Amino acid sequence: MEYPSAMAHDFDETRFIEALTRHQPALEAFCHAKVARREDARDVLQATCLKLWQKAAEWDPDTPFLPWAFAVARFVVLSHVRDKMRDRLVFDEDVVLAMVDETEKAAASFAERREALAECMEKLKPEQRGLLHAHYIAGQGVREIAQSTSRSESAIKMKLLRLRQQLHQCIERQLRTAP
Amino acid sequence: MNDGLTSLEMRMLTLLHGVREECDEAARAELNTLLREEAEARKIMPRLLVDEQALVSLLREEGIVALIEREAKPRQSRVPLRSASRWLRWLVPASMAAAIIWGLVLLGGRPAADSQPRDYIATLLRADTTAELRDPMWMAGQRLSAGPLKLEHGSVLVGMDGGAQLAILGPAEVVLESPGSARLVSGQVAVQAPDEAAGFRLATPAGTAVDLGTEFVVSVDHKGVTECRVLSGEVEWHSARPAQKVALLAESEGRRFRGGQVESLPASSLRFQDFVPPAPPAVANVGELLAYEPFDYAEPMMTADRAHGGMGWPSPWRGPLAPEKVEVAPRMEFEPGASLAFGGLAAPRGGSLVFGAQRWFRARALPLPVDFGADGVHYFSFLMRAMPPTAAAGQKPWPMRFALVSSSTHVWVAVSLGTSFRPLILAQGNNNSAGEPLTAGETVFVVCKVVTSRQGADQMFLRVYRSGESIEAGETTHWTVSSRALHFDDVLDHVELAIPRSEGGRFDELRVGTSWAAVVPLTQRPDQLRATN
């Protein structure tokens, strides 16, 4: 491969780093919404950040960073989708393309959605938090959790899905009622 | 929310679960069809996934807050971070998140350090591989101080400074007491102590296992029932009840201690390696390589601002950072097509940096600064053909120096070769030199590790590999030089090479990363990175 070169042109490095750092969570959310698997999302995010560095001189610091970054990320995602084995993909390419606008909207509001989610999570019971932690942070599968809690797999699966649904609905409510 | 949408959300969550958790191809087809046909589904799905990312982010943060709260102690010798580096503050939790990103939660952790280097007694070498493993921010190599280490799940490998390695399987609570001792409160620990670490002590409620150069595994359950199995070698068991009774456990022997009763255990066919979390796959290391400079320039001489090769660097090379050393059109000298080679570490692309007839400084901005006011671990590696410096008339000879420098305050830390040509760490006036002197013209592979801490002491390590030495796949436990405890909060944002006036000296294959594996490319080279262009 050819190594990505550093910038040949002058650019405002500090502002670029600040923007990339500030918006990286939203970019990761964008990548995750596109590929739906966290490990793939991290690969895509990594490739996107590399690409953004390569193209840093093209960003006008007086314009919003995220739309530009999303545009770059869009191509990296498509490249990932085309390269990836079909059995690893969650969404087909045409579906990824069809969801472009909604994905950008949702990812652009990542900070607000996260804030709303924090409020919603205040209402969860410790065991509900524990379940989410076990699944989403510890990476335990439904079977593993079921075994360790002596519950049936279907019960754990339903608990997880209902929790996700409740949290999603709570976020939507919070955002609708936000001042 | 109306019922239609509620059921649509649930249907999508169920299908998504089927695709991701159960590899259900029918669910995948149905999900894609639904998204093609239903505009509302195309609206909801991205939100569900963005919310999932937010959920993971919040759950990680909860773990981090717990960790910080347990660790937080005032550190008087610190100065505040400079305002110019405010944006870096978020990296503190981001870096600390690494420990839980892999399904690993270290709670309790280390107490705040005072100013003595003995604060650090061990290194977190590795965590188990899970689906989360690829996160580049995992703090492989982070230093651990004496204190409790609680592992909620997963497994970690801890290298004690005394030489023993502990493979800890969660849930477990282990108190690290000294470089040569630990206490197992609950859970399971496998210990490997090479000959030089013989005498390592692992205390339990039932007694203390004293290693005699061996491998053994000890477990303590929630009722305090303790088991000790010797996998190889011998262990001396000092019972707590009756006090001071000592038994010698030979290879394959095991004992269970329940109250005052002792039972024999059947032999185990396991070995220490069976308890060690597997090394991350090679591809995972790529993400931790932040920058790479192969010095594969086509021209033998060019101005520094045209030397912008490699990957990950935000800008080209430049002249000295110190204003008093400013040069007009600083030049760099290369040997195109001629790479340094060290065992299997031949550079994938030809070229090296030449030490020339003049001495000079050349600097390059790091992709991410090394912030000594935040928790982090950085690694640097390079190949060097060491030649003694010579001096022009009226000048002093000047050794080669690889430094991390602040472009604003010009504070620096460095690794170098001392006057006796021995490996040297230079930091805040604390010079630490060790190891055998190098030979003129010898090519060495150098790895430098910089551990920064928000609250505890900072520390630097240097490993110089000489011809014939094998390079460990995992982080070395045999550093050539270790610095004393350092305390400062500067943000060092450039690497700076002090290149001596020295015929025949070369510099090559500079790597910057956040893990040992990223800068010690035994299996993965930057030219094998997935093409993203």
Image (tube, coloured by chain):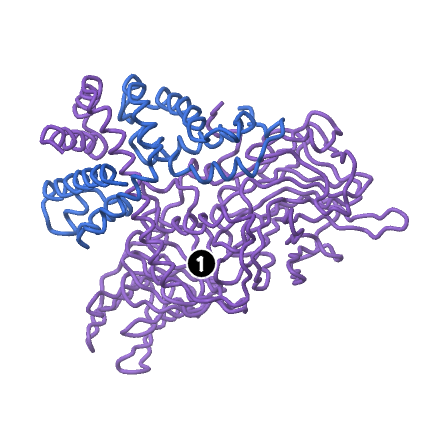
Name which quarter of the figure residue A44 lies in.
Answer: top left
Secondary element at tag 1: strand
Q: Which residue lies under the disc numbered 1?
A: B159
Q: How many marks?
A: 1
Q: Position of residue B443 (x, y in %)?
A: 67, 43
Is A14 situated left or right of B410 in this image? left
Whether residue B262 is situated above or below residue B163 in the rendered picture: below
**Chain colored purple:** B
Counting from the top left corner in percent of width and height, residue B330 is at: 76, 36
Query: Which residue is rendered at x = 61% and y = 37% of the image?
Result: B509
Please tell me which residue lies in front, B310 or B469. Answer: B310
Apparent side of residue A23 relative to residue B257 in the rendered image (left or right):
right
At label 1, the amino acid type is: Gly
The answer to whether B460 appears left or right of B262 in the picture is right
Task: Give the answer, above or below, for where B433 lies relative to A72.
Answer: below
Quick check: B477 above or below B257?
above
Residue B222 in the image: x percent, y percent? 21, 66
Q: Residue furthest bottom?
A: B243
Residue B8 or residue B107, whichever sits in front: B8
Residue furthest to the front: A179
Give the chain coloured blue: A
Subunit bearing disc 1: B
Residue B226 lies, in percent from the top left, at 25, 68
Residue at 46% of width from left, 32% of height from top? A49
Q: For the residue carrying disc 1, how many other residues have a C-alpha within 10 Å: few (<14), some (14-19), or many (20+)?
A: many
